[in-house]
Image (cartoon, grey):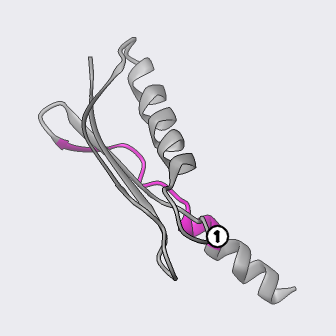
Amino acid sequence: MKKLLICSALLLTACSSTGVVPIDDGIYMIAQRSAQVGFGPPDAVKAEVYKEANEFCAKSNKKVETVNLEMTDSGFAKPGNVSLEFRCK
C-alpha cells in the first residue's frame, strides 16, 4: 500500500503544471512535464497547457496568442516537457 501511495504521488508530481507565471510585460509562461512512459511527443501535455492558457485568457475575455512553444519528446528514462510562452489578445 505504501509503495502505491508513493508511486501515485510521483505520477501526480511528474505531470503537474507550473501554473500561469508572468515572465515579461504581458507575456506569461506555463511549463509541464509529461508522465508519459516510452518514446514520443507529449501531445496530451501540450493540449493541457493550452487549455490552462485559454482558461486564463478567457477570464479577461481574450484569446491565447502563442509567443513561443517548446516541446521535448520523452525518451528512455526521460520525460517529455512542454513550455508555452503566450500573451492574451
- Outermost residue toward the left? 25
Q: Residue at x 55, y 61 (%)?
A: 15
Placement of 27 over or under 70, stated as above or below: above
Q: Is residue 25 left or right of residue 39?
A: left
- Outermost residue toward the right? 1
Q: Is residue 59 left or right of residue 68?
A: right
| Amino acid marked by disc 1 | Leu
Question: Label 1 crowding class (10 Å Cα cut-off): few <14, some 14-19, many 20+?
Answer: some
Q: Quadrant of residue 10?
A: bottom right
Q: Is residue 25 left or right of residue 36?
A: left
Task: Decide whether residue 14 is among the magenta residues.
Answer: yes
The quarter of the rendered structure image containing the C terminus is: top left
Task: Decide whether residue 66 is among the magenta residues.
Answer: no
Task: Tell me the element at label 1.
Answer: helix
Q: Position of residue 7 (x, y in %)?
A: 71, 79
Q: Position of residue 38 (x, y in %)?
A: 59, 71
Q: Position of residue 2 (x, y in %)?
A: 81, 88
Exactly how many numbered labels are in the figure?
Answer: 1
Q: Residue at x 47, y 77 (%)?
A: 78
Boundaries of the magenta span: 11-23
The residue wearing badge 1 is: 11
Looking at the picture, tell me which residue is in the foreground, 73 or 14. Answer: 73
Looking at the picture, tell me which residue is in the foreground, 2 or 76. Answer: 76
Placement of 58 over or under 17, stated as above or below: above
Placement of 57 over or under 48, stated as above or below: above
Q: Residue at x 18, y 30 (%)?
A: 26
Q: Residue at x 52, y 61 (%)?
A: 40
Q: Quadrant of residue 20?
A: top left
Q: Is residue 86 left or right of residue 49?
A: left
Placement of 40 over or under 49, stated as above or below: below
